[in-house]
Amino acid sequence: MSNPRIHLPSLIAINRPKTIMMAIWLCALGAYGVLLLKLGMVLTLVVVVVMGSLTFLVFKPELATLAVMFVLYANFAAIAHQFYGVPKPLAAAVALPLIIPLLTYTILRRQRLVVDRGFVLMLVFLACLIASSFLAKDPMVALGWMGQFLVEGLLVYFLVTNVIRKLTTLKRVIWSVLLAGALMGALSLFWELTGTHIQTGTRIQYEGQAYGQNTSGFAQQKGQFAVDESRGQKIVRTRSAGLIGEPNRYAQIMVVLLPLAIFRFWGERSRFLRLAAAGLTGLILVGILLSFSRMGFLTIVLLLLIMTFMRYLKPSQVFSIALVFAVLVLVAAPDYVVRMESLGRIGGLFSKTTEAPDEAVLGRVAQNLAALRVFLQNPVLGVGPGNFAKFYSTQFVNALSLIHQNEDYRAHSLYLEIAAETGLMGFTAFMAIVWVLMHQLWQLRVRWSQRYPDLANLATAFLLALIAYLATGVFLHLSYSRYFWLLMALSGAAIRTIGLEAWQRAHSVKPLRPAPTPRHDAAA
């Protein structure tokens, strides 16, 4: 008599997609029923929406990256905290959603973490900050500076370089930050066209509100300069500060977008995208104009000269750009000419025959000289992060007798302030970060200019963006540092993704067709 056989259901059925999906839906319905009984209808819907969004982002992690880049560059988190009462810790956590794509790439897709040279050098810079803090008069101020660097510097750099892993993602991120900049420029233009910004005496009226009272926070107006002081009246022009809240900072973060926007116009094949890039470039340029930043104007001139030297522009094209710029100034901001004419008074610092510069320029010169003097007295480790303004600025500025200072101001130079606060060691480590990234971008530009000009042009765009920020750093300290470190992180991601794309094309059976180069000759 044979032994009876036990028949089990085939395991192949469990591997069928329909069976798996049915099991998932049954589990989801069961979980939904439990939540409904425990939490109620409203909280259950909130949980379902959040979990659904997280699940969607796991399969589309790039969307989280694009959203964070847009929100971060548009300064929405700070606006939400300052104007709408969002708690500061919640606003400061704006970059944390990048953890979702990070975990998706590293855990689910089993890709390696990215730790590049820039990140390693940032760790070296952190070590220099720690060493300098031992000499600080107020270690708590130094600790706060380092905490900000950890969150807005190291964390942002690490997350951004790890979530941008493809060239397509990098290009979409560029479009995301360009849209943020264009939005700020459009809001500034809207504010300009719907109200007057001319002040007679000491009061400005805008639709019944006094100057500076922009309760929405999306088109702030800060700062002013004299337009006309004849006939016994002082006519003063206000300056747009966008979503940032400070005109020069607004111009700074907008001017670094210009190379990225211009090279998107040159690099896109689609006519629609080229027109979109041109429109975004125009709105970004309008935002720079309405900030009335002399620093922004000088940086634009510098970019044009460098692009001409690199043979991306012909002299005739530069003349055409200058003509368009002049027309745009006359239409959008005719007082811009008056503002730029004040640059001629800088010669008054060196000659008694020239009219003396305004108090703003004198104050910045005095603060920079004070920072230089502090550095020379503390050349190795400086006076500690964040300690220059609190303990040295006023004392050393007033000793120069150029201007009398009553408040503790920071140095108006990125380089002099870092040198004064971290010494030669910190300054060297900081500049090494910048140099390494710029050098790698330059190498990519030279290496692929002939074979893959579209990749070389993308590297050049980030190189010019870094140059633009460094040029503005001559006049501004490292405030709003998240924008600087975000630009550094995007440059680091560009270096890796461009190199990877070039390698894939070189080893591909059917190499991708590169986009046309905007240069008028083949010289690199």
Image (tube, rainbow, N blue to C red):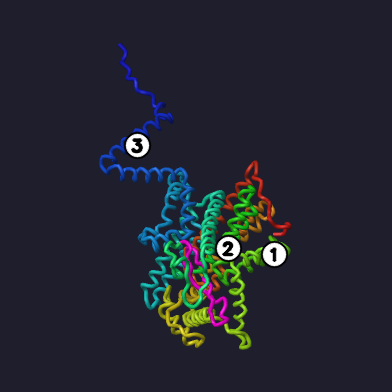
Q: Which residue is mark 3?
A: 28
Q: Are marks 1 and 2 in contact (CB under 8 Å)?
A: no
What mark, if any, has residue 435 been given in the picture?
A: none
Query: What SS does tag 3 mark?
Result: helix
Query: What SS does tag 1 mark?
Result: helix
Q: Which residue is mark 2?
A: 286
**Do we see residue 124 in this rendering?**
no
* Screen quadrant of the C terminus: bottom right
| Horizontal relation, residue 440 to residue 161: left or right | right
* Screen quadrant of the N terminus: top left
Q: Is residue 241 magenta?
A: yes
Image: 287 above or below 35: below
Instruction: Give the extent of the magenta segment.
Output: 218-245
Packing grade of label 3 (10 A; few <14, some 14-19, many >=20) is: few
* Image coordinates for residue 445, horizontal then vertical, percent: 64, 58
Name the residue located 65 percent from the left edge and 41 percent from the top edge.
Answer: 510
* Gap in angstroms between the C-alphas marked 1 and 3: 62 Å
Q: Which residue is mark 1?
A: 318
Name the residue located 36 percent from the left edge and 32 percent from the top edge.
Answer: 23
* Image coordinates for residue 36, horizontal then vertical, percent: 28, 40
Image: 430 above or below 102: below
* Gap in angstroms between the C-alphas marked 2 and 3: 51 Å
What amino acid type should be assigned to the residue bearing mark 2?
Answer: Val
The numbered mark, 1 or 3, whose residue comes first in the sequence reads 3
| Horizontal relation, residue 115 to residue 318: left or right | left
Packing grade of label 2 (10 A; few <14, some 14-19, many >=20) is: many
